[in-house]
Structure formats: structure tokens, C-alpha cells
């Protein structure tokens, strides 16, 4: 009987030690900062007043650039880190929206994936917090509901040389813009800042040349929104910067 009790006690101690080792082996998550920047053909985006030339030869400026980033995923060799419960609103005129903070397990990740827009699970009215910004980004119910994925607006010089307005708006689940960027991202206590840079000129090219003289408003047009969505896969690049 004493021997049995001794064996039982030893077994419990071994299990406790194994459990303790397992807990110690789990590394604490670390904070990672994603910083968003905007440019046009390598130059920092200047809002309202500064004009640019797109691939179709349109002279244009940018007065509004608002969009969401959602469905962020860091792809690693052993596991992926997925963040699919929040849509991050970005406004090019509000630098307080340029930063995204996430907690990741230490590892080396080979690529970053995300969507420009709101992933389907969240793309329903009031599925994300009812802030003023989110309310203003709502997509009309008669056109499918949910949220605008992108608002890119401004003015351009038309064929007659006169100033005219443009508004490139994208919405609806089928136009969600999926982005995949490869880079070796080592996450540890000294993790670099992950820089996502949007080149606004890419919205007008690669793979579809978008001529504002032919199509300056996209909302409600499935074919035009698909063109913009296809171009949007190439608007971001990724780089790393030491803190």
C-alpha cells in the first residue's frame, strides 16, 4: 500500500513538472507596430493642391483617401498569426490612423497577407464599432450593404482642360482586395517596425489602365470596381525599419 501511494505521488509530481516545463516553453507575445505610409511614384503623397500624372496621362490630385485593412495574417514556417476580428480604418489626412499595433508570438514570418476592405464576416452594418468614421464608410443597403472598402477622390483635368471631379469607390464582398507581401519578418523583443507603403499611382494601372476621362465615378459599376480591385493588389509594398 505504501509503495502504491509512493508511486502515485511520484506520478503527480512528474505530471506537474511536465506541465510546468510546457508552460515555460511558451514564449510571451511581443508588440508589433505596423506603420502605414502613402506616396505617389516614390514621392510622399500631398493632399489637395499637388497634382500628379497617372499612366493614362490624367493630371489629378487627391482630396480624400480612406480605406480599411482587415484579415491580417503573418505566415510562418511553424504557424500563422491571424487577426480576423477587427477592421482597421485608415484616413490619409489623419496620421493617428497610420499605426496598427498587434501582439505576435516570437518567430520568423515569411510573408504578410491582408485585405484592403472589410472581410465578409465583418462586412455588415454595425458589425464593427459604430464610430463616426465607420458610419460615414457605410455602403448603401440597396447596393449590398456593408462598408466602403476604398474612397479615393479628387479632381483631374479633363479633355477640355477643365477641372472635373472623380470618385473611385469600391465595396461588396466580391471586390475585396487581397494583398500578399513577401519579406522575412523576425519577431522578437527587438522587432522592427513593419512599414506598409501605398503607392496611389498603382490604383490607375497594373493590371488595368484607368483613364479618368472615360470613367471618373465607379460606385455602382461592377466592372469598374473589379478593375480597381485588381489594381489594388499591387498598391502596397512592405519594408522593415528599426525602432
Image: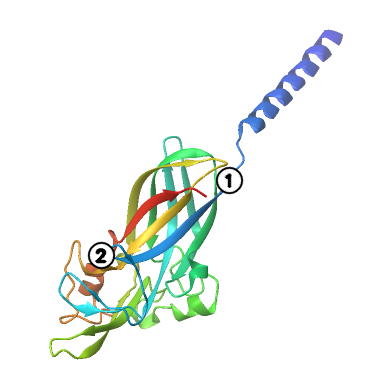
On screen, residue 161 above or below 137: below
Q: 243 or 216, which lies in front?
A: 243
Which quadrant is the N terminus positioned in?
top right
Q: Residues within 10 Å of mark 1 (few under 14, many from 20)?
A: some
Look at 24% across and 64% down and name the residue there.
Answer: 231
Judging from the image, the colouring scheme is rainbow
Which quarter of the picture shows residue 14?
Answer: top right
Q: Residues within 10 Å of mark 2 (few under 14, many from 20)?
A: many
Q: Residue furthest left?
A: 159
One can see residue 1 in this view:
no
On screen, residue 69 above or below 7: below
Q: Is residue 5 left or right of residue 81?
A: right
One can see residue 23 in this view:
yes
- Give me the disc on residue 30: 1
Q: Is residue 124 left or right of residue 225?
A: right
Residue 210 image position (x, y, % from top left): 18, 72
On screen, residue 3 above or below 184: above
Residue 114 image position (x, y, % from top left): 39, 56
Which quarter of the picture shows residue 93?
Answer: bottom left
Residue 186 image position (x, y, % from top left): 47, 40
Q: 223 or 141, which lies in front?
A: 223
On screen, residue 217 above or below 202: below
Q: Secondary structure at mark 1?
A: strand
Give the CA separation, mark 1 to mark 2.
33 Å
Q: Secondary structure at mark 2?
A: helix
Look at 31% across and 82% down and name the residue there.
Answer: 154
Q: Is residue 142 left or right of residue 205?
A: right
Residue 120 image position (x, y, % from top left): 41, 63
| Residue on which the image places disc 2 | 202
Look at 41% across and 63% down and name the residue there.
Answer: 37
Which quarter of the picture shows residue 167?
Answer: bottom left
Amino acid at each position: 500500500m505504501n509503495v502504491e501511494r509512493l508511486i502515485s505521488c511520484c506520478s503527480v509530481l512528474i505530471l506537474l513538472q511536465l506541465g510546468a516545463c510546457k508552460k515555460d516553453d511558451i514564449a510571451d507575445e511581443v508588440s508589433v507596430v505596423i506603420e502605414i505610409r502613402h506616396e505617389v511614384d516614390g514621392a510622399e503623397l500631398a493632399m489637395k493642391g499637388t497634382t500628379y500624372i497617372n499612366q493614362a496621362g490624367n493630371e489629378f490630385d487627391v482630396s480624400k483617401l480612406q480605406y480599411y485593412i482587415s484579415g491580417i495574417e503573418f505566415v510562418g514556417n511553424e504557424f500563422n498569426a491571424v487577426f480576423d476580428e477587427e477592421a482597421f480604418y485608415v484616413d490619409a489626412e489623419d496620421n493617428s490612423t497610420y499605426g496598427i499595433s498587434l501582439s505576435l508570438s516570437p518567430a520568423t514570418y515569411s510573408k504578410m497577407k491582408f485585405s484592403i476592405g472589410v472581410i465578409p464576416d465583418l462586412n455588415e452594418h454595425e458589425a464593427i464599432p459604430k464610430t463616426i468614421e465607420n458610419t460615414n464608410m457605410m455602403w448603401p443597403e440597396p447596393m449590398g450593404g456593408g462598408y466602403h472598402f476604398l474612397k479615393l477622390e479628387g479632381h483631374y483635368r479633363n479633355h477640355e482642360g477643365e477641372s472635373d471631379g472623380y470618385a473611385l469607390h469600391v465595396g461588396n464582398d466580391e471586390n475585396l482586395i487581397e494583398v500578399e507581401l513577401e519579406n522575412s519578418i523576425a519577431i522578437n523583443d527587438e522587432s522592427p517596425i513593419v512599414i506598409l507603403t501605398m503607392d496611389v499611382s498603382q490604383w490607375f494601372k497594373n493590371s488595368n489602365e484607368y483613364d479618368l476621362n472615360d470613367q471618373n465615378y465607379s460606385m455602382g459599376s461592377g466592372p469598374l470596381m473589379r478593375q480597381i480591385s485588381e489594381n489594388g493588389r499591387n498598391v502596397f509594398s512592405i519594408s522593415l525599419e528599426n525602432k
